[in-house]
Amino acid sequence: MPIIDRYFLREIIKPLVGISIILLAIFVSFIALKFLTDAANGLLPGRIVLDLIGLRLIVSLEFLLPTTLFFSVVVAFGRLYADSEMTALFACGVGLNRVIKVVFSLSLVVAALVTGLSLHVRPWAFNAFYRLRDQAMAEFDLSKLDGGKFYQIPLENRIFFADGVDHDRNRATGVFVETKRGSIVQVISAKELYQRQDEGGSKPVLVFLDGYLYEFREDEGGHIVGFRESTLSLEGNNVPSANYRVRAAETARLALSADLPDVAEWQGRLASPLSSVLLALLAVPLSRSAPRQGKYARIVSGVVIYALYYNVSAMAKSWVERGVVPVVPGIWWVPALLAGVVLALLRQQVLDYFRREQRPGRPAPIDAATRHADKKGSP
């Protein structure tokens, strides 16, 4: 590998290590705070907290790797522009194509890793995560909760509130429970609640007394049902969520499915490696700055563009799931739009480079052969 290429790679890898550590620390701190809070409130067995954090971290690598590469390229070449090194390299005949080649090659390596994570590791990690979720739900204990507080039942889209909890009798009064299942929101309001085990003695069941069940669907209204007694199983598989099933589904199954959530997940997994390459190439023109402007001058614009792209991608995936956008173009219009932006910016940067090289009076680059010939012919 030429010396210049190795130099570019080294400059990219140096901030890559630091940015990886920072992003991982932020992410681990965020999810650890949530799980540790649930464990402290008695909603989550403490022994599975580390396992949950590890699984969420494995899943997060799918987007942390492209993010790290994107910002590493912005910082690395931002420093080279700020210190006028890029100007000197261009003056010595190092073309912009060398920069693009190095970044593209490195992005292919990252894309290969992301492909493995997205297609194979992601479903495995989510399967393990949901098994732990079911285990945590099976150990739910009403007597550990306090009255007058809102609780997010761990690993479920469910909120619990009670005016008071009698820990000796394992009963609660003035109960409010909200559960979200995809597009359905279910609310249970009851005067009293107690907990028991099912007939097998392995799954916790909440028994509501004298209350109402409210169920609402998006764009379809809702209905209300009164009851004297109603039960709710806390075993995770009895409260299915489309997102849970899809995220844990094997990639081969998604490829053969015609269900819209499966199609959206399948396209999202395929788009992840492509996004890795496009974001890395986008960082090349984005890193260009004026000399002495500072190597972090383009970080803010990079954060804005990165956040915009991933938010639009998430929105496009949601549209496919709900049938707002057909399977074709599906979510592919988002990376296609990004590819168009990347090509336009790179084209403009290449044109600027050639205009600078062809300015009247600008000396031509001196290569090694010319210097050797001049030295040999000098007296």
Image: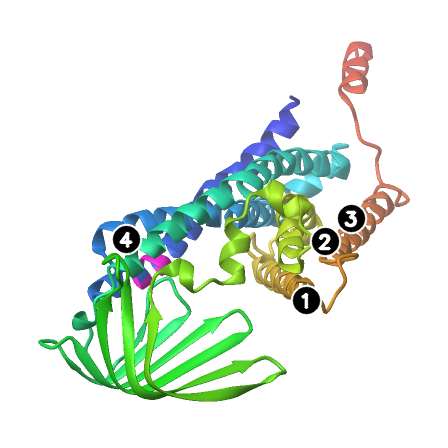
In the rendered view of the protein, which quadrant contains the C terminus? top right
| Residue 74, horizontal then vertical, whole percent | 60, 49
Q: Nearer the viewer, mark 3 or mark 4?
A: 4
Local secondary structure at mark 2: helix
97 or 183, nearer to the observer: 183
Residue at the spot of label 1: 319
Q: CA distance from mark 4 to mark 2?
A: 36 Å
Magenta stretch in the rendered image: 30-34
For badge 2, the amino acid type reads Pro
Of pointers 3 and 4, the one earlier in the residue sequence: 4
Q: 196 above or below 133?
A: below
For badge 4, the amino acid type reads Val
Of pointers 3 and 2, the one earlier in the residue sequence: 2
Q: CA distance from mark 3 to mark 4?
A: 46 Å
In the rendered view of the protein, which quadrant contains the N terminus? top right
Q: CA distance from mark 1 to mark 3?
A: 30 Å
For badge 3, the amino acid type reads Leu
Q: Is residue 33 magenta?
A: yes
Local secondary structure at mark 1: helix
For badge 1, the amino acid type reads Trp
Can you tell which quarter of the image residue 2 is in? top right
Residue at the spot of label 4: 49
- The label shown at residue 103 is none
